[in-house]
Amino acid sequence: MPLYIVPTPIGNLSDITFRAIDILKNSDIIFAEDTRTSKKLLNHYSINTKIESFHKYNEHFKLNSILKKLESKDKISVISDAGTPGISDPGFLLVRESLASGYEVFCLPGPTALIPAIIQSGFPTDRFVFEGFLPLKKGRKKRLEELANESRTIIIYESPYRVLKSLQQFIIYFDPNRKVSIVRELTKKFETQFRGTISQAIEFYKKNKPKGEFVICISSSKED
Ligand code: SAM
């Protein structure tokens, strides 16, 4: 049996495909980042499949037992707390090792925060670079220096506690008039979007304390 990577909603519980529900219902086991978080979703869709944890602290430890289950032809699904496993969430290691061991891997199309964030930014989507969470300390300066000249649209995941600090750091490296689109709480009740220059975003978030989940899109350095 192949390994199934199954995206789950990033807020709105209705954002799950019929196929995702079907695969989760018909799996022998679901590996989830946080079993308590995922049980809410699984209960909502009456999915009674056995569930076990698979997160960044045990992914190395669990790898071999999951590969053995694939060898025994168990149907295995992997989900994360929200969105697509492997995108700033555990998944990559298991996918790489499953392929290396000769198993097929199918990733279902579905929710992830980066795609709605870039689409509704209005910035070019033909070429973009997804940075996930920027390094917090080591390597951060170098990364920002590289991004200063990036001609593709940049997508960054950021915690609410660091949105303002990061923007204040961006203007050290980037043109303060470079445009940003910052989405908050995608698909949720208090979804909002800020569009403007980096300087304007700083003024906005000084007055409006960032709360919730954020994706920052930065326009090309070449935009005029
Ligand atoms: N696997 C997820 C995906 O496919 O997008 C990402 C998981 S990562 C641990 C969590 C980060 O994703 C958040 O800090 C935020 O940057 C972004 N994110 C997830 N859900 C979001 C939402 N509803 N609105 C805005 N950003 C979101």
Image (cartoon, rainbow, N blue to C red):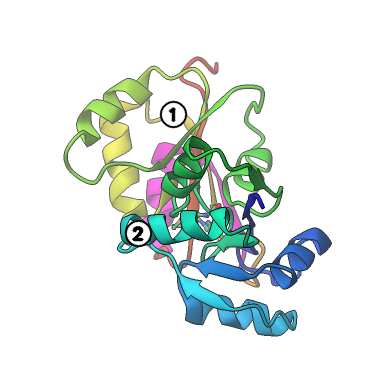
Relative image position of residue 71 (x, y in whole percent): 55, 53
Q: How many marks?
A: 2
State the quadrant of the C terminus.
Answer: top right
The furthest residue to the front: 72
Does the stretch in magenta take in 161? no
Mark closer to the observer (2, 1): 2
Task: Report the residue at 52% width, 66% height from top.
Answer: 31
Task: Report the residue at 37% width, 53% height from top.
Answer: 163
Query: What is the crowding at mark 1: few (fewer than 14 residues within 10 Å), some, or many (at least 20)?
Result: few
Looking at the image, is 140 positioned above or below residue 39?
Answer: above
Relative image position of residue 35 (x, y in whole percent): 49, 77
Judged left or right of residue 217, residue 122 is right
Looking at the image, is 31 positioned above or below residue 195?
Answer: below
Judged left or right of residue 62, residue 38 is right
Image quadrant assignment for residue 6: bottom right
Residue identified by numbered label 2: 56
Does the stretch in magenta take in 192? yes
104 and 208: which one is in front? 104
User: Which region is colored magenta?
Assistant: 190-208
Task: Report the residue at 59% width, 78% height from top.
Answer: 50
Q: CA distance from mark 2 to mark 1?
A: 38 Å
200 and 39: which one is in front? 39
Q: Amino acid at mark 1?
A: Asn
The furthest residue to the left: 138
Label 2 vs 1, first from the N-terminus: 2
Residue identified by numbered label 1: 177
Query: What is the crowding at mark 2: few (fewer than 14 residues within 10 Å), some, or many (at least 20)?
Result: few
105 and 70: which one is in front? 70
